Image: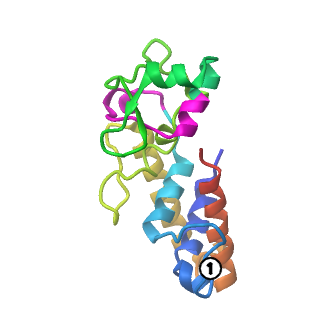
Amino acid sequence: MTDPNEVAIKLLQATSMTDETAFAGGLIKGAPGLTVIDYYRIACHMLFKCHRCGTCCTTGDPIRLRKEDAKAIARHLKIPLDRAIKKYTIPDPKNTGALAFKKTRPCRFYDPSLGGCKIYPARPWSCQIFPFLGIYGPEEAVKVNESCKGSVQAMNALTAALEEARSGAGRAGAGHVDAELARQAKIWFNKILDGIG
């Protein structure tokens, strides 16, 4: 389980200065430059616990897939890749070269009797990053999906932990942050991001 207080302290450290300042003009090798909102999205994602309500599975449209997702689904279903692509996907109408599930609303792999996804271990990356890391809403805000209980709970947990960290900033290490502490927190978040999908 992820500790909201640890996440909040790391978040305050990581967002205490820009990536450019923390890394003296250079970024983490191979890592994108992240914005403050990106760090908040990663923090929310870390605290997110799926309640298997099916809201995202029954309202998502389109559900996008990368080639790697199609391969993982084919392996999971123990069928050839070309058959999985033909049976379950179409070209994504909004993204040249990408794929999307043929059937959405609900997703063909959503099973209400299971309370969730039949291919959960091989679910697409777009499902893995929902609800915080995809582009949902304006870039300058973290989108909380009110119909998603886990989304609301993650934001509430982060908000409470941030308030606690700010009130005890001196003892928690989240007050004055030197560049090395900020760099380490930024690297920590980038490792989390790299581990998704």
Snapshot quadrant of residue 19: bottom right
Coloured how? rainbow
- Nearest the viewer among 40 and 93 is 93
Give the residue type that dot 1 points to.
Gly
Residue wearing tag 1: 170
Left or right: where does residue 99 sit relative to residue 118?
left
Position of residue 92 measured from the top left corner of the image (x, y, whole percent): 36, 38
What residue lies at 46% left-to-right and 41% top-to-bottom? Answer: 126
What residue lies at 42% left-to-right and 45% top-to-bottom? Answer: 131
- Residue 68 forms part of the magenta stretch: yes
- Nearest the viewer among 22 and 161 is 22
The C terminus lies in which quarter of the figure? top right
Position of residue 44 measured from the top left corner of the image (x, y, whole percent): 49, 53
Snapshot quadrant of residue 183: bottom right
What residue lies at 49% left-to-right and 45% top-to-bottom? Answer: 129
Which range of residues does the magenta coloring cover? 51-72
- Nearest the viewer among 162 and 89 is 89
- Residue 155 forms part of the magenta stretch: no
Left or right: where does residue 89 sit relative to residue 197?
left
Q: Is residue 89 above or below residue 62?
A: above
Position of residue 190 measured from the top left corner of the image (x, y, whole percent): 62, 62
Camera sees residue 176: no
Position of residue 43 measured from the top left corner of the image (x, y, whole percent): 53, 57
What residue lies at 36% left-to-right and 30% top-to-bottom? Answer: 55
The N terminus lies in which quarter of the figure? top right
Give the total number of marks visible in the rendering: 1
Label 1: element kind? helix
Left or right: where does residue 129 sit relative to residue 77?
left
